[in-house]
Image: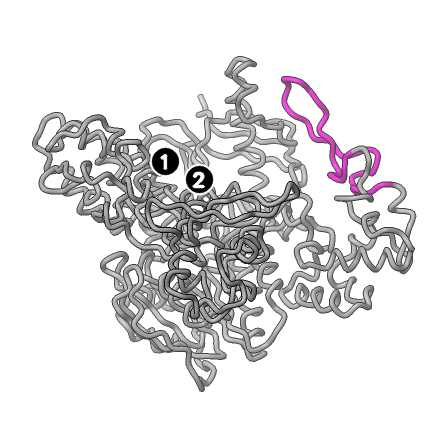
Amino acid sequence: MSETKDEIILRGMKENNLKNIDLNIQKEKITVFTGISGSGKSSVVFDTLATESRRQMTLNYPLFVRNQMPRYERPHADLMQNLSPVVVVEQRPFGGNSRSTVGTYMDINPLIRLLFSRIGSPPIGSATDFSSQSSFGRCPKCSGYGEVVAPDLNKIIDFDKSLRDYAVKFKPLSPSGWQGRWMITGGLFDPDLPIKDYPEEDLELLIYGPPEGEKVFAPFHTKNGPQPHEWDGLLPRFTRLYINRDVSKLKQVSLDDVLAVSTRAFCPTCQGSGLNPKVLECRINGLNIAEYDQLELTELLAELTKMIDPLGKSIAQQAIPLVNQLVEMGLGYLSLSRKMGTLSGGEAQRVKIARHLGSSLNNITYIFDEPSAGLHPKEVDMLIQMLERIKAQHNTVIVIEHDLSVIKVADEIIEMGPGASVHGGEVVYQGKLVGLINSKAVTTLMPKLKINKHPREIKSYFTVKGAKNNNLKNISVTIPKNVFVSICGVSGSGKSSLMLEAFPRRYPETIQVGQGSIGISNRSTLATYMGIMDDIRAIFARKTGQPAGLFSFNSLGACPICKGKGVTTPDVAFADPVTISCEACDGTRYSDEALTFTYQDKSIVEMLNLTIDEAMNYFEKGKIIKRVSTLKEVGLGYLTLGQTTSSLSGGEVQRLKLASHLQKEGQIYLLDEPSLGLHTEDNVKLLDVFQTLVNKGNSVIIIEHNLDFITESDWVIELGPGGGKEGGHIIFEGTPEEMLHAETVTAKWLKDGITS
């Protein structure tokens, strides 16, 4: 009797750019999807397989419950069988609030609080009393935030100016606001005398208000005549109105506005922990809960394993596996108190992965989106071991990946392509590793690292002196100007601290291109993102005599049926949601009236269907041509002006972000891991953009793990040797060729890449 394979069966997949393809994916194996950006990998894995699995899972619940859950539209496919429940680890950045830490994200903090509430001495009370968000546990001085925000007098007041000349620099308290006008007209202060010339008594009244126990009133002029209003002093008023309240609910001022005229410091009452001093008196083995939070995870593990108290030991044993998962992922240098928003891309990726490793369930499909993103080659080895462990527990592992080290350990490789967008959506190769070598796939398993043996001549430098933020060890560094520089090192070695904090403080003119998204939506297009859509609408309006809004699908020109969305979602009550192309506008988003007007024989829709290359010959206006030419420079000439940013691949988004900054020469470009999520073919295109930028007189500095970029650089700086406390040192400075003779972690992998 022949053995029956247990596999996921997918037939007739047509989601996004998929060309009616069929796939069988083996269960309890590691399957890697690869291919250039936009080739259709995510359309198969996320938009079809994961979405259908989630949709079918919700069908197990009663209708009332399903109405409270996320609803999934059935993917465009003919057949989807033998699916398992899915756990998806995506690349999306954390959306947590400012209080979110490693401890809260991993659910370790509740266990530590429980531990202190049960065996801490002296005893305090319940576990919630050890939280900075509880009424008892929070510090009375800083309300649990761990830092005190206070107004900075010299930032708020210019003592050389008078009240009428805007001596008060904080806008809501200046003459542009009612409070500033009241100070001028209330009669308490001379509005035309420089503040520095005020008599001491008037200065005290202006800044601090009347003496304690006294009240001072000044008339405030309203439509009903002057009304007496109490004056309490600039600083007390600022503190009451803008520090001791939620400014996010105010329309005229933002938190950034308040912080710009304030100072922030560790709260002296709780020493930055955010906890009530009474809570900090409770200790286990000489440590309070704030000190537990500050321990590196390796140190915390040692504390938890030496518990003797039977109750404490049982609680600690629940926390130990969670801490251990982080340590095994190479994150032992982090602490529970580390803010999630301060993690590097590689660190954040591994914390997300570690969160899903504690389950003892099997027959689950684990889906990882570029798990090697942001990882140093040394750390990719840990990732591979983790994938193998998940598979060994009888789970299916599906990985979208470009890293060759991960591709080589796959039981099966599926390459999508052959091109991107409409030129992709097909299965180029499916099979074992050995077959890929002889196939027509884009992915090559024998990459050839080319060492830059002719680096550009260095004539001048940027300098950063005495950097000691975060884990930096009071380092000074010189970074060559007008060349291509790579900053490398293991995760947590100090790359971001040096380049994303210390360097921009010294050189604020730096143009930073980070890892963040571009705020994509289905209404955002290349034309809107590049800031030329208003100019295009103005041209149509001027040539046709119609209002500019008629040429916007977000305004007067929107199709009246779909409201400019191009699709409709009919009400299907409790059934699965359905999205269909709008029949009235045929998906163009525009009304019939808008399409009757043309410019140079093209309607607004036909114009938006022009490729970037075609648009170069269509427009005459300088600004539009200049912006469009930057898209061509970064190799996006094949995209259309009306293409939605939500449909772009990772490689296209990365180049689009860069294009939006390409306007001047002699600039400093600083990019944080630009190769993130890119196939080797996309890397080549991006490298060409960087080299062109440098040739035009710009300085290009990248924070990068990818050896393809490091070897092509003119200069390399490595931080390390480890992460956290073990990092923060400059361990190499020189050319890529000189790095071959160094003994650093990156040098080891560089040598292996050259000789393999």
**Above or below 380: residue 166:** below
Stretch of the chain drawn in magenta: 562-591
Q: Position of residue 267 (x, y in %)?
A: 28, 49
Residue at the (50%, 43%) spot, across then down: 248
Q: Amino acid at mark 1?
A: His
**Above or below 617: residue 438:** above
Q: Nearer the viewer, residue 363 or 527?
A: 527
Task: Confirm whether the magenta stretch covers residue 569.
Answer: yes
Q: Report the disc number at residue 679.
A: none
Q: Report the disc number at residue 89.
A: 2
Residue at the (51%, 59%) spot, across then down: 680
Q: Amino acid at mark 2?
A: Val
Quarter of the image with the N terminus in it:
top left
Residue identifier under label 1: 356
The CA span between labels 1 and 2 is 8 Å
Task: Confirm whether the magenta stretch covers residue 42.
Answer: no
